[in-house]
Each structure stands twice: as C-alpha cells, then as structure tokens.
Image: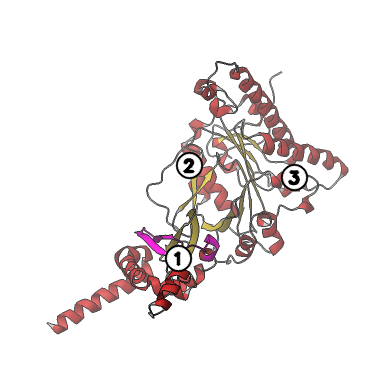
Amino acid sequence: MGWLTISVLAVVVGLALLLRWRRPAWFWMTFGVVYSVLKVRFRYANVMDACDLTVPASRFRLWLARMLNQEIPRQRVPRLMWIKPTRTGLRLRIRMQPGQDAFDYSSAVDRLRHAFGVHQVTSREIKPGVVEIAMTGYDVLRRVQMPAKIERKGLKVPVALVEDGSVYFRDYWSVPHSVTIGASGSGKSVYQRRVIKELAALRVALVGIDCKQGVELSPLARRFSALADNPDDAAELLEALVDRMDEIYQVIRRVQRVSADTPDAEIAANIWDLPENERPVPIVLTIDEIAELALTTSRADEKRRTRIIVALVRLAQLGRAAGIFLDIYGQRFGSELGDGITMLRAQLTGRTAHRVNDESSSKMAFGDVSPHAVFAATQIRNDRPGMAVVGYSNGEWARIRTPHTTMREAVTACNKHADLTPDVPELARFRPVFDTDLTKAPATLEPVAEAA
C-alpha cells in the first residue's frame, strides 16, 4: 500500500511539473490556484507585517494593556475582505487600516510578489479605504492566449493581454486619439494589424496614410475607404477629412433645434446623439509613420508639412464629436520633428510604447504620464516582440503584449468584411482601385480622377 501511495504521489508531482513547464495555464487551474489560496490564507498576517503594511495598535488599546498589565497588542493587520481566483491568478480585496493609503500597497508589490511566490502583483484603489491586489500566477505574456469569449461593445476592440491576465481594449469612445511608438522589430506593426483586423468587422470607415509606398496598409486596402501612400496625397486626404468634419458639424447643428421644450436627451452635441438613420459613419484614421509626414527636405516641402500638421491638429482637437478618430504610429514622436508636433501630441490621450532604443523616446510618450512608465518602456526585452507599455491620463500604466497577428490573418479579415467598407463621398477620389484579375496586384493607390 505504501509503494502504491508513493507511486501515485510521484505521478501527480511529475504531471504537475510537466504542466508547469509546458502548459502553465493548465498547471495554475489544477494545482497552482489551490496552493496559492492556502498560502494567502495561512500566511496573510505574517506577510502584511513583513511588508510593512500593518499599523500600530490604537492608543486606547495600548493604554488599556498598560493599565491591566497585559501584553502589548500586536500590529493591526489590514482586513482581507475576500479572495477571488481567476484563470490567471488571484484577486484580493483589502480594507486598509486608518493611516494607510493606496501608495503604501503599490510601493510594496515587489515584496508581496516574493512573499507569496507569484509571478506578478499589481495594486489599484477601488474606493476610499479599499484596494485590490491582482496576483498573476504565471507569465501570461510569454505565450499570449486571448480569452475565447470577449465581450465586444461599440467602438471597443480587444487588442492585447495585460500582465494581470485581463484584456486590453482600444476604446475609441473613452480614448479617441492615440499614439504608438516603437523601434524597428518591436512589434508595432503587429499591434497595428491587430487593431485593423478587429475594426474590419465593425461598421466603421477605415482611412490610411502609409508613406512607405503603402507596403504596410495596401494589402489591407479592400477594407479601406481611402488610402494615401505619399505626403502630397496625404495632405489632400487630411484636408478632405477636415472638410467632412465641418460638414458633419453642420448636420449636428441642423438636427439640434434646441428650444425650451426640447428634452435634454434629444439635444445633439455629437454624431452619437443623432438619429441612427442620419448618423454619419465613424472614421478611424491610421497613420503608419508620422515622421514621413513631418520631415522636410526643401522649402517647397515646408508648405505641405504645414498643411498636414494644421489638419492633424484640427482633427485631434475637434474630430471626436464628428466621429473621426486618430491612430498615429512612429518610431519617435518628439519636438525634433518640427513645429506643431508637441501641440499634436498633447491632443493624443492614448499612449503606447513598444521597445525603444533610448530613454528619450519613452519620455516622448510617458514623460507627462508617469516616470515609472518611462522606466518600464526601456526595460522591454528584445526577445519579446509585441510587448508594450500603455499609459493612461490619470498616471496609471500597465504592460501588455499583442498576440502575434500575421499579415495574412489581417488580409483575410479585411477581405472577409470588404462588403462593410462604406463609401465616403468626400474621400471618393482616394478610394483604392482594384483590378478584376485577382492574380495581379490587389490595389493601386493613386487617387481616382474626379468626374468632370
């Protein structure tokens, strides 16, 4: 009987080690979650004390102990409200003791990680007096696997996986404009393909500017309502977008008809307040390399550059209410690109930085968000393409990694949903033209000649 028990234990231990090596997610769901919950339950008070997350006993209790000649009360431990296992880790809801703040817990996440023996720990304040500790049982960013079922709503598309196991969404309603930077080979293009692949299935017009002769966006052209592959066409395309934005504002003004008896819910201030049959289709503008639009080599280029930057600033300032959203990509996005770049960057709420070659590049993205995010962006390893740091306007940041998306996958998605490509009259002359012979090049990016 003893040998049988030993054999069974050996098989279980061997299976656990094999799963931990080959399938860390399965190991966590079968063995790791039980072990971690027991560890938190039994070691919680000692860990809080060792990590300096306790407070001294109240003066009344100390006075009472002296009066009754009793042992001095031990440190007060923050109350563990509940433990919630997830598919990637644990979530602890903790009520802080008087005198503590959320920064005490965020500064102790490394100590908590070592004490509980988990891969990653993050902390955030839920409400005054309550923090949530998110523990990740294994490296979820080593082999990115998006959840099978993801809730999709409106202009909110799943793009990547966060280090705590949650899904990172590109939400155009809350973050209308964004900038994504990264060195060559950092996974910036994969992130771009993923965004376009997810947008292809939505009722939205995709507009692209790719001044690398269209090598990044032209394969996806069947889903694009407009596409420009050189700075001259880009300047005209941007000005056409500005004209469309002005026309949309005129539509909103005509629909408003504000009077004393008009209900508040019927007063339109953006396209989402318009009746569905009168609502213009939203537009997502993707600019593949911002430096190609901002750099100049002659005085003649300066005039074109000024037109481009002015149009981009206007779209960033006013485009959200008209349903025009910007996704700008580049290796750098600093003031060395010329006048107006800093003003444009200030309008871009979303900040994403893949691996960068120097600290100044990450400061361009996160210098006004968080110094910790700047440091994290410089620590991304070369063997982790697609890994990035995202920053939020409230100072929070997180590490994410985009699942590998090939060009073929993105092309397949765009071709599958090509029938959803809306016709935008103001951009008709920039609509890609396709040859009926599918064995030839898929598109020519020259603007279509306007009808006489």
Quadrant, the C terminus: top right
**Circle 2 Cα neighbour tier, 10 Å, few/some/many (<14 / 14–19 / ≥20):** some
Q: Indicate which disc residue 139 carries.
A: 1
Which of the pair 290/416 is nearer the observer?
Answer: 290
Question: What secondary structure is marked by label 2?
Answer: helix
Earlier-in-chain disc, 1 versus 3 = 1
Quadrant of residue 380 in the image? Answer: bottom right
Q: Is residue 242 above or below residue 92?
A: above
Amino acid type of the residue that numbered disc 1 sits on in the rendered structure: Asp
- Residue at 36 percent across and 65 percent down: it is 23
Q: Are the residues tagged 1 and 2 within 8 Å (C-beta)? A: no
Instruction: Please tell me whether residue 349 belongs to the stretch shown in magenta.
Output: no
The residue carrying mark 3 is 343
Q: Which residues are magenta?
A: 79-104
Amino acid type of the residue that numbered disc 2 sits on in the rendered structure: Ala
Q: Where residue 36 appears, x then y in whole percent?
A: 35, 68
Q: Where residue 332 appears, x then y in whole percent?
A: 70, 55
Lateral position of residue 333 relative to residue 56, left or right: right
Earlier-in-chain disc, 1 versus 2 = 1
